[in-house]
Image (spheres, grey):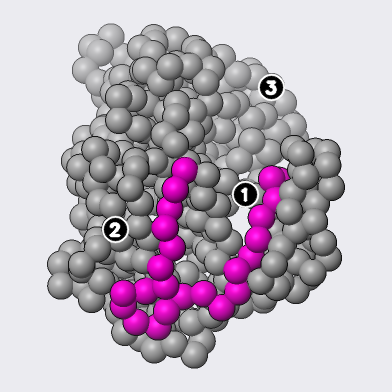
Amino acid sequence: MNKLQTFALVTSIVGATSIFAGACVDDGGGSTSGGGATGPGGMGSTGGSTSTGGTGGTGGAGGAGGMGGMGGMGGMVIENTGADTCPGDAYPLTHGTHLFLAGDTTGATNDYESTACGVMGSTGPDNVYRFTLSERGTFSYKITPYNGSTIDPAVIWREGGDCEGTGFPVGCFAFFDSQEGFTAEIGPGGPMRFEFTDFHFIVDGENGSAGEYLLEVSFTAPDCGDGAINVGEECDDGNVVDNDGCSATCTVETTSIFDVCPGQPVTVNPNVTVIEPGSTWGYADDYNYLAQQDCAFDSLGGKDRVYRVMPTAAGTLTATIGLDANGMDEVCETEGLGSPQCWDATLFAVGPTDCDDANMDNILDAPQLACSDQQLYGPETISFPVLANTEYFIVVDSPFNGQLYFGSYNLKLELTP
């Protein structure tokens, strides 16, 4: 789903006071193979799940099976969950709750849809859950196809008492092909949009898709470093480290390091991948890109950070943002919407040699080489020809200046001679 298809959806979900931030948690999976052993967290092997799962040991590893790739603190897969109609299969949430709920929409009916789910729509058969809580906390979920299913998950949130959908949903999440995820603080006294203590969670499918799924749900006490911007926090980038734009006490650190031209120096050698971790937390909106090519949305400008890149050979320089620290997987799809690294980024380049003019009018007047602003929550990539030992300037930016438009990232640079 591209930006043009989903822009209206996100603005309706987010609103001006959105606090989407966070990262989903993976714990151990259960199976008939038995419990996890004491020691460092392991990896669950593939295999069939049952209603009782392996219990993680101290620091432990989950039981084998359940869902291939789940490891960590141990867990249990509960089979055959989800009700076909409202009010839903009920589960209370208390601090420390961590559930793996397996279900199947194949035999269900298409009872509920939401136009907020975008062009493809939530038109598949659906299952319903009802979650209740009495205290504020950080709620995270991740939903993925299960046992070889081809469902393209969509998730609709509705407040308690509105399961049938007479009002606009709290949110509808249908951004990615193989899984959906989200993290936010919810509960009494929490952020205005998530202040409810009773909500309905509808598992649906995009474009009529159906099948087995695994819904992972966790609920923890709000805490700095949990990846969600809790009440009283200015930011939360998922860690408690200072000098990265968001402090160890979750306050924004205003910084001028590489905020403006000429930027952070980076040398790139042929056929050697460079990955630069960074953040726009605490940065300012210094530059707006004159919209060209694929950057029509970059009109208002978001927080930005500048890199001064020196290729050591002539060739094609490629820059990508939106991947994990290994430069391989898409962060938004693997970690879920709301991860500190999942935000709407823009990537553009100017140069060579010149970065900004003397007017300092927030417009980069140097020759514009490339720009990418195609994906709402997905990687952005630019490529352009370069000369050896000549400086070029790459700017990490965002089309708007709001909560979903800055965060942490990995900038991947590659030089092909």
The residue identified by callout 3 is 312
Q: Is residue 279 visible?
A: yes
Instruction: Tell me the kind of residue under disc 1.
Output: Asp
Residue appearing at x 49%, y 82% in the figure: 105
Q: Quadrant of residue 12?
A: bottom left
The residue identified by callout 2 is 198
Q: CA distance from mark 1 to mark 2?
A: 24 Å
Q: Which quarter of the image is occupied by the C terminus?
A: top right
Magenta segment: 72-95
Q: CA distance from mark 2 to mark 3?
A: 58 Å
Up-down relation of residue 131 to residue 332 (above or below): below
Residue appearing at x 30%, y 30% in the figure: 231
Crowding around mark 2 (Cα neighbors within 10 Å: few <14, some 14 to 19, many 20+) is some
Q: Which quarter of the image is occupied by the N terminus?
A: bottom left
> Mark 1 or mark 2, which has the lower sequence index?
1
Residue 77 x, y percent position in the rendering: 64, 65
